[in-house]
Amino acid sequence: MRIEGSVALVTGANRGLGQVYARELVRRGAARVYGAARDAARVTEPGVTPVTLDITDAGRVAQVAGECGDVSLLVNNAGVLKYSTFTEAPSLDAARQEMETNYFGTLSMCRAFAPVLGRNGGGAIVNMLSVTSFYTNPLDGSYGASKAAAWSMTNGVRVELHHQGTLVVAVHASFIDTEMAALVSGPKDSPESVVGQALDAVAAGQIEVLADERTRFVKASLARDHELIYPPVQKFWDDAIAARP
Ligand SMILES: NC(=O)c1ccc[n+]([C@@H]2O[C@H](COP(=O)([O-])OP(=O)(O)OC[C@H]3O[C@@H](n4cnc5c(N)ncnc54)[C@H](OP(=O)(O)O)[C@@H]3O)[C@@H](O)[C@H]2O)c1
């Protein structure tokens, strides 16, 4: 799909990766870029049209799909990470918020915009997923579950919208250098690298982006996950438990 001349809508466009998506879409010549955010006043990127949108508000999602009927490229970027374990989190609140946003919110956007994209010639959807779509780490256990659900949904939406010519791109990445990963030390992808690869994939008609070495390793190791992926995760977690006072 051609990015130049397209009309894009990016969720979570006020900061982090979403702001970089919006900036790069303008730079690549999109005819219009809607920057959706819970607080539209915080969408400050030049050339971007602010839109108020909380993706967990199904009524507002439907309204925005009506108001932005010219969209041909939907970037489902908005997401939350609560750093919540499965068994020790004090309640289900974090897990529910991650599922409501990362899975149901993204699903709600895909459903609302599917007919819009169909009317506009097919277009494309980019879903921001994660390396944790492929495996579980207790550090961000319930977040991984929500991204695994969103990965499954992304594959299904691709199959369902093939008939109308909609390209559905899954973008998986390890840690990216934004506020979401501020607590994490160690290597991080730059937002510009992830966004560049995602938009190159849209332009090339490619359905999956594995943005870094770690993500490529994990995806390639899935058939032997209990041999290759989980032993170091288990050791990390057992050591962390043993080091507790
Ligand atoms: N950073 C990483 O390490 C990493 C790695 C892999 C994948 N990802 C994924 O990449 C995407 C972007 O993450 P990021 O790194 O840019 O995170 P971020 O810096 O925390 O930004 C998250 C964005 O999502 C928005 N958002 C959250 N809940 C929303 C809702 N209900 N409705 C609308 N907007 C909402 C936030 O808006 P507010 O400002 O209103 O909170 C913010 O704009 C997410 O889907 C994330 O899961 C991130």
Image: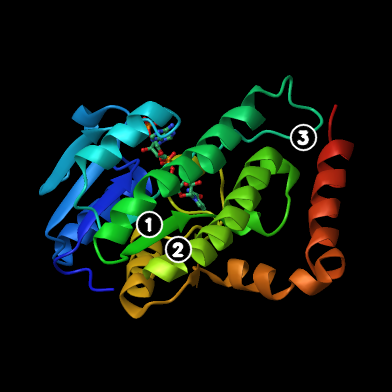
- The label on residue 191 is 1
Q: How is the image coloured?
A: rainbow
Question: Can residue 43 be seen by looking at this rendering?
Answer: no
Amino acid carrying mark 2 in the image: Leu
Residue at the spot 60% in from the left edge and 36% down from the top edge = 99
Q: Does 204 appear above or below 81? A: below
* 197 over 106 or under it: above or below: below
Task: Give the mark nearest the N terminus, 2 or 3.
Answer: 3
Q: Tell me the amino acid under the disc marked 3.
A: Phe
> Label 1 to label 2, Cα distance in Å?
28 Å
C-alpha distance separating marks 2 and 3:
34 Å
Residue 156 image offset from top left, x and y in percent: 57, 60
Residue reaching furthest to the top? 90
The residue pinned by badge 2 equals 161
Q: Position of residue 240 (x, y in %)?
A: 81, 41
In the rendered structure, which disc, 3 or 1, sits on the residue that comes first in sequence?
3
Which circle marks residue 86 in the picture?
Answer: 3
What is the quadrant of residue 51 in the picture? Answer: top left
Task: Give coordinates of residue 121: x percent, y percent.
Answer: 26, 66
